[in-house]
Every structure is written in C-alpha cells, then in structure tokens.
Image (tube, rainbow, N blue to C red):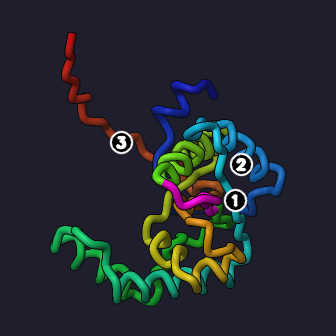
Amino acid sequence: MDLQQAIRSRRAVREYTQEPVSESALERLIDSAIQAPSAVNEQPWHFTVVRAQGLLGSISNEAKAHLLTTPPAGMHPNHLEHFRQILGDPKFQIFYHAPALIVISSTVRDQWALENCALAAENLMLAACAEGLGTCWIGFAQSWLGTREGLATLGLPESHLPVAPIIVGHPKLPPPTVPRKPAEIRWIG
C-alpha cells in the first residue's frame, strides 16, 4: 500500500478478530513509530506492549472508574452524559477486546511531550494500516494511565508520561470510508 492510500484509508477500528498480532509485526510498527520527527531530535519515546487480555480488562475497569469520578475538564455537557452512559456499562471494554495495546509514553515531561508522542503514534497507525491491521487511539485510557497506579501497572517510572494508548489488531471488517470536510485554508502572501 502506498503512503497516500494509507493516509486516506486509515480509520479508527473498534471491532477485531481474536487473531493475535505477531511480535514481529508489533516490532515493525514500533520501528515505524521511532522514525517520526521529535523536538530537538530528542526521540523521547517509550513503548509498552500489553497483550494479556486479563490485564487489558483490568486497565479498562480502572480507567472507566477513574473517568466517571474525574471527567475531562471542558467537556461539553451533552458529551459528558453520553460518555457516562457508555462508561457505566459493565460490559463495555474500552479496548474493544483488541489483541494488543501499545502505549506510547514520553520519557520526559517537557513542553513537547504530547507532540513528540503524537507524531510517533501517527507513524505507527499508518504503518499498521499499510500492513492490513487496524488501530484506535483510546483516549478513555489516557488519564488513568498517567496516575501513579496506572504507571505502576505498566511498570513505568513517574518521570514517564503515557500519551498515546493505541489498540492494534486484525479488523473484523474493513473500516468504512468516512468523508472529510474540505480544508479551511487562509492564504497569506
């Protein structure tokens, strides 16, 4: 798959087969991630791969409980109620039972931590698409993973900042095409 095709076909996937993703495939995705640019070429990435379904279920439960008690600041009230309903469902697993979770963390908590990890995450997700794998950045997990308990669960020191929890797996169905709004462009000069 060429780059333009991957860019245009990569979408969030939330339904996966139970087929595991091989360690070599996960390593290729991480190798693509580390090719991303970073501020002052610091390359401050750390990757935690979780494939144990019991642990993913436990993280899901902890993250749901955390979000229900500490909702994100600035969330629109309509969205807040919708998310409370979803998160309150004991059957809902935030990782959609994907076979793998890759958490991209910054090894430093500086002003570029989010951007550096987001650049690596996009590389990883495009590489996964090119390999026929699906991905989804799970924002529901971010807040809890950054707590002391979340960091300890991942075996990370408190100096690390989990930024991009991305599930990876074999999609049950090809993701649908989602139309894009036209770009808003302001030309100067």
For disc 2, the marked residue is: 30
The residue stretch that appears in magenta? 103-110
- Comparing 107 with 69, the one in front is 107
| CB-based contact (under 8 Å), mark 3 and mark 2 | no
- Which is nearer the N-term, disc 1 or disc 2? 2
Q: Position of residue 135 (x, y in %)?
A: 56, 54
Q: Amino acid at mark 3?
A: Val
- Comparing 171 with 156, the one in front is 156
Neighbour tally class for label 1: few under 14, some 14-19, many 20 plus, Cα within 10 Å: some
Distance CA(mark 1)–CA(mark 2): 8 Å
In the orientation shown, which residue stands out farthest toward the left? 77
Image quadrant where residue 42 sits? top right
Task: Please state, as top left, top right, bottom left or bottom right, where the N terminus lies in the image.
Answer: top right
Q: Which element carries disc 3, helix, strand or loop?
A: loop
Q: Residue at x 65, y 51 (%)?
A: 44
For disc 1, the marked residue is: 47
Neighbour tally class for label 3: few under 14, some 14-19, many 20 plus, Cα within 10 Å: few
- Comparing 134 with 125, the one in front is 125
Q: Residue at x 54, y 61 (%)?
A: 109
Q: Residue at x 18, y 68 (%)?
A: 76
Distance CA(mark 3)–CA(mark 1): 29 Å
